[in-house]
Image: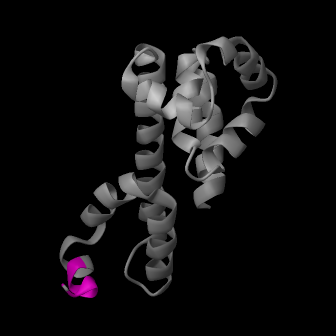
Amino acid sequence: MPDVFALLHTYSYWILIPVSLIEGPVVAFIAGTLAAAGYFNIYLLAAIFFITDMGKDGFYYALGHFGKKTTLAHKFLDKIGVTETHFDEVRRVWERHPLRTMFFGKLAYGVATGFIVLAGAIRMKLSTFFSYGAIVVVLQYG
């Protein structure tokens, strides 16, 4: 097994980007702990995790928006139990309570991706999506 500290010293922040795309919150917790020990700059970590999380959200939003009829999109929507017959009802929930829906949707471990795909599938306004998404990301990683 390679020495983790040697890897961190050699690749530093570059190793965090692909790993955070796979499991952001767990990696952020570990990186934050290492920042307290002096291995990372906490502000640079915040920027990295913010950008990677918003990038992932943008990708999944686009998947729902442009490919809601694809097998991949349906895989995520099926995971949260939503079909196209539910879209009008779900759209009303997103429109009435966007911050609350985004907050609980993104923090629901295992189904968060489905909520993001769903936001794209119901054609949630992009500026609203990213505004509330940014708030939740700051709260989540803060």
Whether 5 is among the magenta residues is yes
Q: Is residue 25 above or below residue 84?
A: below
Instruction: Return the residue nearer the eye: 59 or 133.
Output: 59
Q: Residue at x 64, y 49 (%)?
A: 108
Q: Is residue 83 above or below residue 22?
A: above
Main SS of the magenta segment?
Answer: helix
Query: Which percent across, then down, holds residue 58?
Result: 45, 32
Side (left or right) of 141 relative to 17 = right
Query: Which percent across, then down, holds residue 24?
Result: 46, 58
Q: Is residue 56 above or below residue 122?
A: below
Q: Residue at x 77, y 24 (%)?
A: 93
Query: Which percent across, then down, holds residue 88?
Result: 71, 11
Please tell me in which quadrant of the rendered image residue 35 appears: bottom left
Instruction: Return the residue nearer the eye: 127 or 25.
Output: 25
Q: Quadrant of the N terminus?
A: bottom left
Q: Residue at x 77, y 38 (%)?
A: 100
Side (left or right) of 2 relative to 31 = left
What residue range appears in magenta? Answer: 2-7
